[in-house]
Image (cartoon, rainbow, N blue to C red):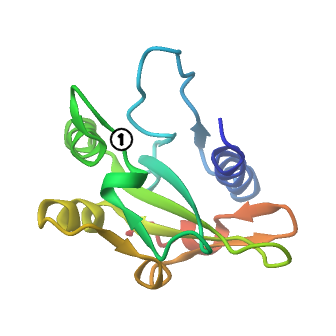
Amino acid sequence: MTEFERELVNAFNNFFDEEEINGIAHRKKQHRFSSQLCDVLVDSEHEMFYLAIENKSVKESSTNKLYFSQHFSESDNGHQVDRISDFLDKSGRKGILAVEIKRGRGRPRQAYAVPWQIVKERFENGEPGLHLDEIREHPEILRSSESYSVAEIAMDMDI
């Protein structure tokens, strides 16, 4: 589990505890030779919190775009965007692409929640990826000190 995945799981679980909402965020155990569909799953009796989240981290100094060819995987089962889209369709979950932008030494990381539907549409339209400026137009997952908080965006999970 990456640090960003762990922080996002903790952010959702802390939010559920603080707001006394029945829900849990978790990471499926990954086996060495099997792929997982999404990084973080969120389960709840509340439909708005029935989520599948794919996490990506990029260094702002290395790229200005999250590329479908570079940042997403491809396997015998197809491209990662198609595999996740299929999982979302079959499971009834809402999909989110959580993008963490690492901005370099002395500058805090930023993370954003992009609705999966946008990712899917761009991929299907043959676009190479999502520009970081475009990603920044979506709801920010706020960070204080060393942890993320989903409290600001959680009640507006129509993303």
The amino acid type of the residue labelled 1 equals Ser
Report x, y in % for residue 84: 30, 42
As drawn, 58 above or below 43: below
In the image: residue 107, left or right of residue 42:
right
Report helix, strand or loop for mark 1.
Answer: loop
105 or 84: nearer the viewer:
105
Q: Quadrant of the C terminus?
A: bottom left
Residue at label 1? 73
148 or 72: nearer the viewer:
72
Report x, y in % for residue 60: 60, 74
Q: Residue at x 66, y 68 (%)?
A: 151
Q: Residue at x 38, y 34 (%)?
A: 37
57 or 151: nearer the viewer:
57
Q: Residue at x 64, y 64 (%)?
A: 150
In the image: residue 73, left or right of residue 146:
left
Q: Quadrant of the N terminus?
A: top right
Quadrant in the picture for residue 23 = top right
Instruction: Count the marks.
Output: 1
In the image: residue 147, left or right of residue 60:
right
Report x, y in % for residue 4: 67, 51
The residue carrying pointer 1 sits among few (fewer than 14), some (14 to 19) or many (20 or more) residues within 10 Å by Cα, namely few
Quadrant in the picture for residue 58 = bottom right
